[in-house]
Image (cartoon, coloured by chain):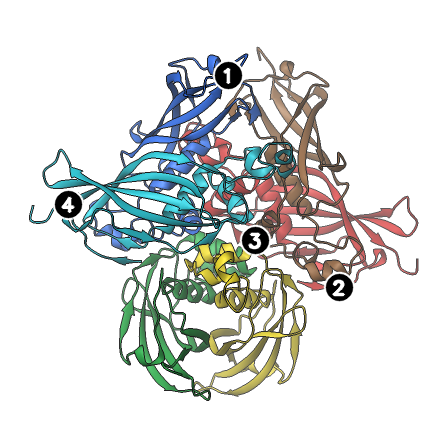
Chain colours: A green, B yellow, C red, D brown, E blue, F cyan
Amino acid sequence: MHIISRFYEDYELGSKRETLGRTITETDFVVHAGHTGDYFPHHMDAEWCKTQPFKQRIAHGTLTFAVGIGMTATEINPEAFSKGYDRLRFVKPVYIGDTISVVVTISEKKESNKPALGHITEHVEIFNQRGELVLVCDHILLAKKKDK
Amino acid sequence: MHIISRFYEDYELGSKRETLGRTITETDFVVHAGHTGDYFPHHMDAEWCKTQPFKQRIAHGTLTFAVGIGMTATEINPEAFSKGYDRLRFVKPVYIGDTISVVVTISEKKESNKPALGHITEHVEIFNQRGELVLVCDHILLAKKKDK
Amino acid sequence: MHIISRFYEDYELGSKRETLGRTITETDFVVHAGHTGDYFPHHMDAEWCKTQPFKQRIAHGTLTFAVGIGMTATEINPEAFSKGYDRLRFVKPVYIGDTISVVVTISEKKESNKPALGHITEHVEIFNQRGELVLVCDHILLAKKKDK
Amino acid sequence: MHIISRFYEDYELGSKRETLGRTITETDFVVHAGHTGDYFPHHMDAEWCKTQPFKQRIAHGTLTFAVGIGMTATEINPEAFSKGYDRLRFVKPVYIGDTISVVVTISEKKESNKPALGHITEHVEIFNQRGELVLVCDHILLAKKKDK
Amino acid sequence: MHIISRFYEDYELGSKRETLGRTITETDFVVHAGHTGDYFPHHMDAEWCKTQPFKQRIAHGTLTFAVGIGMTATEINPEAFSKGYDRLRFVKPVYIGDTISVVVTISEKKESNKPALGHITEHVEIFNQRGELVLVCDHILLAKKKDK
Amino acid sequence: MHIISRFYEDYELGSKRETLGRTITETDFVVHAGHTGDYFPHHMDAEWCKTQPFKQRIAHGTLTFAVGIGMTATEINPEAFSKGYDRLRFVKPVYIGDTISVVVTISEKKESNKPALGHITEHVEIFNQRGELVLVCDHILLAKKKDK
């Protein structure tokens, strides 16, 4: 984790960064349930899950999202701030023992309605250990322009 | 937490449900950092925050989102599943000691490209104890239609 | 979790409510030890447990009790408050991977020494995934009477 | 934590042991809610609590019980096992920042229906930093008799 | 955990104390990563570890150290305080499921540069369930002398 | 967190790296006690601490060490591995609310008894928000030499 100044002009369309992997454990399921209060049986009841099409506990969507986004939190840019996320989709279930990694691509740059700021879109893809896409979203940043 | 069957037809446009409140604590900040690996100083370094415009530690966006969504997880509907979220926006910072509550409104119903399923949009608003909107997003569900 | 007013007269003798299931994980054992400070080898030392009649780690009695009671915490009744518990018994061990669910039965109603209040007994039974009773207790509530 | 053999005959009626103190923190409240799934506003919503007679968040009864019992877990007796608890009563609320300590008194010894075992009752009292009793219960043990 | 006064003169060279065992779980790995912020793939990425000589996740050195030292924290001596540690060595990896126990030996006593205090060295050895040494260090204490 | 190859020859004597800050919270104290099992009143009993010279709860030495070392875990070097630590000293107490940061200096390079490896010493200094040194230690690494 370190601080690097990146202005709107410094973001290069199409550039990518990729994280290392992290294995999603039963502990993460239990911690996430306890943190959020979501004890739905999909995540917490192994016996009930055996009776369902997915056969085993599946990660909360918010778990995969929050952990995946956390994995990309390595560089602090004081010239930009997070506005939110668009098109967040749960593509495939994440199971206990799956290992996820994240690819972030600068997918869009456009003017903002404030002339001193520009919109940056980071396209975020979370993959499991078989290379399957499990979650996708677009992170929307507002970045300062230089000399403004 | 209980199981209630709700088909596409059962969702009533404009109907609302509201959660009780939950105080966001310093513990939640520390747990969220540890859960996600995001130790950005915005959330974890009280001294550095004093030098910033917001003056104090602010909650991770993913914290407010995950906890707020967790607070709405009270009813299991076996006829629907979560597809994802749209237009997630961090409207105002959440500070240690703020108490949040959530209002969910059925804001849209539309046909899906699969005739047996319909799209439901739940508009999710998270408020602090002063009634200020802090986070907003649209939850996208796919719900089964009756008799299909 | 929601708020419903129930007065003494509203509790119906013999009525039952049942929770969904929750799988007790190794994480729950470790969290409970860390939360309570009870690191007895019965719960924490897999090697020592192999030399004991029960052969594997068993849940703290307070874990099964606290989690089981937590599973029943779905309805807030502002007209009643918890006085305590009677006849709490650890009937069978709970192992890592067991899935518990809880049945609560209104088993007794009687006058209190304060005329405005009545005693309610909730008989609490915690079962594992094989339907075996693992813990039993009586929850003692004091509930307001109507028009008093 | 250490292992000491104590048979039925070794328990002395009226003998006492006392623990050191432990401050109950906001973290303990959040951990307990997450561990048990009990997010009742009495424990988790500081704003709502301000509108209630107790004015501030109060500890879950199961928190005070589980932590207090954990504080007494210092001596492993291979000759006895825990049968359960009787007359558990929540006498006074425990607030964030209260420091609790526990006194355990051997309050009863009696024959069991199995001749090789005897009943021991440990009377457990949990006090706050002002010396006020906050929780009381009777721990029921079955202890082996010597030479049987 | 209890309080016992031990002065410099009371420490006997060569005397030993030994802890019970504790199984190091996947939960401990996840908790330690979250507590310290160290998410190195050696501890957190089961897939990457398969490609490494050690083949599976290994405990953080600071995990084995902190937990092992915690296991020895059973006796509070108001006459001594901890100065630090020397010659801390990670001798063998600790894997998920290993059970560790600790032997502490009084290995050195010597004068301090303050005449009222003496140096005590506790040699700390942490073993796994196969009796293999996994971590070793020397704990340096300063203890008061009697009648000074 | 990223992977960078650094051989023995690449470590430059006297070079420094510095972390951002992290505020040590009451939550960290409670998590560390629960993780390690060390519930000594110095860390956990605010009332008892008021009667002691330090007046308030102080961090476990192993907490400051493990968190401080974790804060330096930003760069994975596949050419080196950690052998251990020397001269770890607890210089000043860390209190709840203190913010620590870490400076790591390459303080020594020397031949190892294996010709393909060299010894690197990283001198680690942990400071609080007033710039006071609170913990110091020497991290001992073995690094591969180039072309060997």
Q: Would you name the residue on which mark 3 appears?
A: D34
Q: Which mark is residue C4?
A: 2
Q: Residue at label 1?
A: E7
- Label 2: state its secondary structure: loop
The amino acid at mark 4 is Lys
Single out the mark in the foreground, 1 or 2: 1
Q: Nearer the viewer, mark 3 or mark 4?
A: 4
Tell me the distance, in whole angstroms, between the alpha carbons under discs 4 and 2.
68 Å
The residue positioned 57% from the left and 67% from the top of the image is B94
Q: Position of residue D40 (x, y in %)?
A: 67, 57
For the residues beneath circles 4 and 2, the answer to whether they share a chain is: no
**Residue A59, position as x, y percentages in the image:** 44, 62
Q: Return the chain for callout 4.
A: F
Q: Residue at x 34, y 38 (%)?
A: F137
Amino acid type, residue under disc 2 in the picture: Ile
- Residue C62: x and y in percent read 60, 40
Q: Which mark is residue F144?
A: 4
Q: Tell me what residue is drawn at x 70 percent, y 62 percent.
A: D47
In the rendered view, would you say D110 is above or below D138?
A: above
Which element is circle 4 on? strand
